[in-house]
Amino acid sequence: MAVPKCKVSKQRRNKRFANWKIRPINLIECPQCHNLMKSHAVCKSCGYYNGVPVVHKEAKKD
Ligand SMILES: [Zn+2]
């Protein structure tokens, strides 16, 4: 809900931004294709998750 700028105190506004923090994404090596992938996610390059093909991608010939 939109609140007028003058109604939000400096303390309240600053507390909101105090908890805002960027963390680097956790990249791990895929056990299937050995590319970097996000942990706890389906691999973008081979479509495997936990050794199981979840997303069926066409095999690239290279
Ligand atoms: Zn992979």
Image (tube, rainbow, N blue to C red):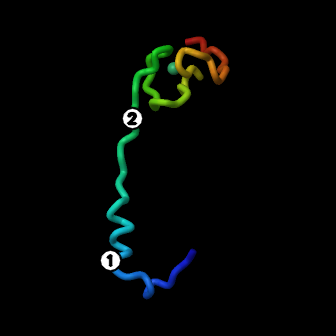
* Mark closer to the chain start, 2 or 1: 1
User: Could you classify mark 2 by the number of other residues whose Cα lies within 10 Å: few (under 14), some (14-19), or many (20 or more)?
Assistant: few
Amino acid type at image mark 2: Asn
Q: Secondary structure at mark 2?
A: loop
Camera-side residue: 3 or 48?
Answer: 3
Q: Is residue 1 above or below residue 20?
A: below
6 sits to left or right of 49: left
- What residue lies at 33% left-to-right and 72% top-to-bottom? 14
Q: Secondary structure at mark 1?
A: helix
Q: Is residue 15 above or below residue 28?
A: below
- Residue 37, percent from left and from top: 46, 28
On the image, numbered disc 2 is attached to which residue? 26
Residue 28 tag number: none
- What residue lies at 63% left-to-right and 22% top-to-bottom? 54
- What residue lies at 32% left-to-right and 64% top-to-bottom? 18
- Residue 50, percent from left and from top: 53, 19
Task: Check the picture and name the quadrant holding the N terminus.
Answer: bottom right
- What residue lies at 59% left-to-right and 22% top-to-bottom? 47
Q: Are marks 2 and 1 in contact (CB under 8 Å)?
A: no
32 sits to left or right of 61: left
24 sits to left or right of 35: left
On the image, numbered disc 1 is attached to which residue? 11
